[in-house]
Image: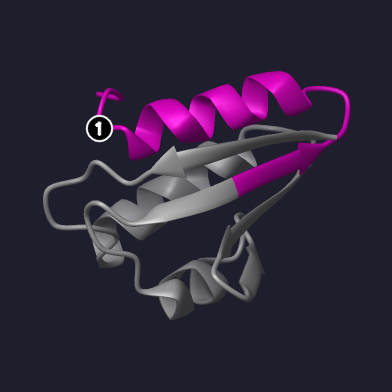
Amino acid sequence: MTKRNIQVRLENGLEARPVALLVQEASKYESTIYIQSGERRVNAKSIMGMMSLGLDNGEKLEVSAEGTDEQAAVEGIEEFLSGKAS
């Protein structure tokens, strides 16, 4: 399992469109990916789960992935949340 703490660096946080794009990013990987904020832990491939987190710019969260491409999955999620993805 690979885990990493990440700070959200998206100007408007995770609103509907960024959440949809994040779920698309997570779905590229075979690994199981979870995002945890406080006590809430959701599947990063679930649009409803991700929307329920209501993450804002500057918030800190933990991304964990387990599977054959877990390292790449965590790096891809980190790149997206840091605002570096195109």
Q: Is residue 41 above or below residue 45?
A: below
Residue found at x 62% / y 76%? 39
Percent across and percent down for residue 85 are 31, 25
Left/right of residue 20 with respect to residue 37 in the rendered view: left
The N terminus, quarter of image: top right
Q: Is residue 64 above or below residue 76?
A: below
Percent across and percent down for residue 16 are 28, 67
Number of numbered discs: 1
Q: Which residues are magenta?
A: 63-86
Residue found at x 33% / y 57%? 59
Amino acid carrying label 1: it is Gly
Percent across and percent down for residue 64 are 70, 44
- Indicate the secondary structure of the residue bearing disc 1: loop
Left/right of residue 86 with respect to residue 61 in the rendered view: left
Instruction: Name the residue carrying label 1.
Output: 83
The quarter of the displayed image where residue 55 is located = bottom left
Left/right of residue 35 with respect to residue 13 in the rendered view: right
Instruction: Count neighbours of disc 1 (C-alpha within 10 A) and say few if under 14, some if 14 to 19, many if 20 or more.
Output: few
Residue found at x 41% / y 52%? 60
The quarter of the displayed image where residue 80 is located = top left
Residue 35 in the magenta stretch? The answer is no
The C terminus, quarter of image: top left
The quarter of the displayed image where residue 35 is located = bottom right
